[in-house]
Image (cartoon, rainbow, N blue to C red):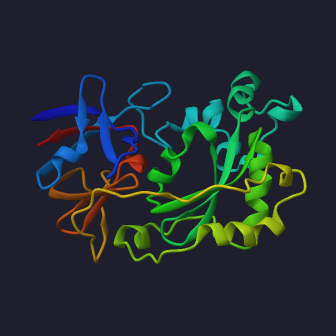
Amino acid sequence: MLYTGVLTKMQTEFLEPIQYYLVFENDFIHVNQLLNKTIDIKLIGHQCLSCGLNKSIYRQGFCKTCFFDKPFAGDWIMRPELSTAHLGKEDRDLDYETKVQLQPHIVYLANSSNVKVGVTRKSQVPTRWIDQGAHEAVEIVEVPNRYLAGITEVALKDYVADKTNWRTMLKNDIKDEDLLEWKQKLKAYIPEEALPYFIEDNTETHIKFPVEHYPEKLKSLNLSKTPHYSGKLIGIKGQYLIFEDDTVFNVRSNEGSVVELSI
């Protein structure tokens, strides 16, 4: 089978194990069904996820112009503490920023390579944890806007990591952690504005990924450097495809790539 389309992050379904789907304009691929099959990946071009033009991808699937102009690539996306819609202050497009920033957000702890703190919209739980390759996660606070979530994350990352070590995550070199215990320890450092939103009574969410076995020596596939690759798929974790020869391919970091997939 031959599939052609623009890569975007894999869609997921929270089952045991997680179910993964690649969505192209004219094709829908259930990636779990490709486990133990050889996949041939060929880069044939690029397409900006915003303007749709065949332009080099700068970051996050966008060309350089769209990355610096469009509201969905503003600095507050990666740094939620910079959100200003709650003040009625525009960054790039106040209507868009109001819609996204002024909705319930979760500050959470996740264990993907180590215990880390993160922020996501409530509507993206547990998708965000799945995309990060977390085996377990728990909500700390649920706040009404992105700014409050951002300042909470900034305060807590002085005491716990805020990034995932992707190599450790993919090797599955992870120890179980009591995230509820961590949550209680960190409560003392939550900013006063966010403390009323602390979630007292909840449980850990556990996530199982479809991986036959984990790689030992990782080789990251970069399509701009290796535009043609073929390998046997043995696992899917986070937004990574894991191949038998220890090659790993981050679908999300290759968004905007136009590819041919041959199965």
* Residue at the (53%, 72%) spot, across then down: 114
Q: Compared with residue 107, is residue 86 higher up or lower down, i.e. above or below?
A: above
Q: Position of residue 150 (x, y in %)?
A: 75, 51
Which residue appears farthest toward the front when viewing the image?
201
Residue 65 vs residue 36, the one in the foreground: 36
Quadrant where the N terminus is found in the figure: top left
Asked where in the image residue 103 lies, by quadrant, the reply is: top right
The residue under the point 55% across, 44% down is: 125
Q: Nearer the viewer, residue 111 or 224?
A: 111
Q: Is residue 79 left or right of residue 41?
A: right
Q: Quadrant of residue 6?
A: top left
Name the side, left or right, on which 5 lies relative to 192.
left
Q: Quadrant of the C terminus?
A: top left
Residue 145 rendering spot, x and y as whole percentages: 76, 39
Where residue 190 sits: x, y (%)?
Answer: 82, 61
- Compared to 59, does 6 lie above or below? above
